[in-house]
Amino acid sequence: MQKAFSRKVNELKEITDGGFLLAVSGGIDSMCMADLFLKTGESFAVAHCNFHLRGEESDEDAALVRAWTEEHSVRFHLRNFDTAGYAEKQGISIEMAARDLRYSWFSDLCEEFGYKVVIVAHNADDNAETLMLNLLRGCGLKGASAIAPLSVLPDGRSGDVKLFRPLLDVTRKQIEGYVFANGIAYRTDRTNFESDYKRNRIRNEVFPHFAKINPSFVRTLNRDIDYFTDAAQIVESWCEKAAAEVTEHSSEHGSIYIDIKKLMEYKQWKYLLYYILQPYGFTSLVLSSLENLLVSERTISGKRFESSAYVLMTGRNGLFVEPIDSVSHKELTENDAMVTVRAPGRYSFCGTTFMVEILPYSKDMSLKQPSGTVIMDAGRMRFPFVCRKWRQGDWLVPFGMKGKKKVSDLFADLKYDLHSKKVSIIMVDTRTDGLAEVQHVAGVLGVRIDDAYKVTESTERILRLSVITSE
């Protein structure tokens, strides 16, 4: 074990210039790792987190690690945490709280002392447990890769600090054999034998049954994880190229548009959709509902799905994803002066709900639209624009005409009564002048557009606005 461990450390030194920090809890895994690292002859420091979750036992863990570092003249860092208080304040689990506190402190230590690599004692059994947890949550191939041997410290602040797991291919039984053979002192966490947490339940209740079926199941699962990792890299490359063909991104608003027709031309469109939406936090239940909708004969347009931070809205030909706190999701009342349309999405104003879409344009596309829908050249009518109520003096050059026409005269041609005028929505290009105060309007929602915004042979994308009627 020592020879293989030393080889990994030497390989790590080829990509980093040292500065090793070992996370040591005092348990059998981390004490084994500390002894193995000590025998490499490399300089390192030890960090211990006292989460104060087990009373005196937690303090005794810290005392053991401190004594080991003093015996071997290793720099020791200790941090005490009110883990339960932090978890309650943040509204998260104890496990998640401990993880957040641990990695945040490691990052602080790296910034202060210049450590470049944080080393933790995850082993092959941990890897197998993570695989099972990921599969139960619904993870795709990426989650089936379980734990990476080398990654970036997951705190969002540490830049190029690496997180290294040198025991990931070593089973817990091998660790126990090494520790007993070398007389290494360690502490036993009694909570590891309690099945209150999901991981412990898998370890204590599920894995013993696996062992009866296959005594070497941990190694078998870890070998499969290696295959899953290779397969995931192949699939990732394919999905990255395919996603570029079916999506459009808006860097300004963090929104994306997914072309439904292009998406479903792929035989593997369901996984491709999962790949595209996975970063936005939509649950497997949402994905299942969305897949069923796309293959059904039901009306696709006008549906809304939410994750914790994003909203997905369906159009006739596409799916729109944008931040949930975007202005486009604000439901306005008739007392509001206007709504600013900053991105594709579903909007409500003046008692009318409408969908805004950006679509690619081809010359064989029909320009004839159903009642309540207008299309414009997206290169001319660009975000943001304003939708507001009609005002006296508003005018436009109606599509197909050359002269100006007052909107009030257009209403007269349409035989609008006073109520119809009151609820009509005027579209204003904010780039022309004075935001929504300008009288030259770009169109009347669902009715007519100004000729300057019409689709031409040079049009590459169209802006489509559709009034949504109750189904």
Image: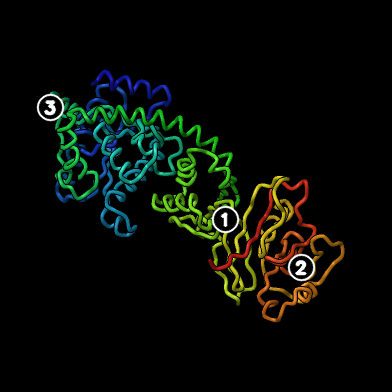
Q: Can residue 393 be seen in this view?
A: no
Please name the residue shown 14% across and 49% down the image.
Answer: 56
Taking 256 as reference, is 140 above or below it? Answer: above
The picture quadrant where one finds residue 432 is bottom right
Kindly identify which residue carries mark 3: 180
The colour mode here is rainbow
SS type, badge 3 = helix
Type of amino acid at the residue the image marks with label 1: Gly
Is disc 2 surrounded by few (<14), some (14 to 19) or many (20+) residues within 10 Å? some
Q: Which residue is drawn at 75% across and 77% down?
A: 415
Q: Nearer the viewer, mark 3 or mark 1?
A: 1
Write down the residue under mark 2: 438
Q: Residue 315 carries which label?
A: 1
Density class for disc 3 (Cα within 10 Å; few <14, some 14-19, many ≥20) is few
Instruction: Answer above or below: position of 60 versus 394.
Output: above
Where does the image place residue 139, in percent across and percent down from the top left? 37, 42
Quadrant placement of the N terminus: top left
Mark 2 belongs to which amino acid? Val
Q: Do labels 2 and 1 touch, CB within 8 Å?
A: no
Q: In this view, does 32 lie to the left or right of 238?
A: left
Residue 102 locus on image (x, y percent): 32, 44
Label whose residue precedes the other's in the sequence (3 or 1) = 3
Identified by mark 3, the residue type is Phe
Pair 3/2: label in front: 2
Residue drawn 61% across the image and 56% down it: 343
**Foreground label between 2 and 1:** 1
Residue lying furthest top = 3
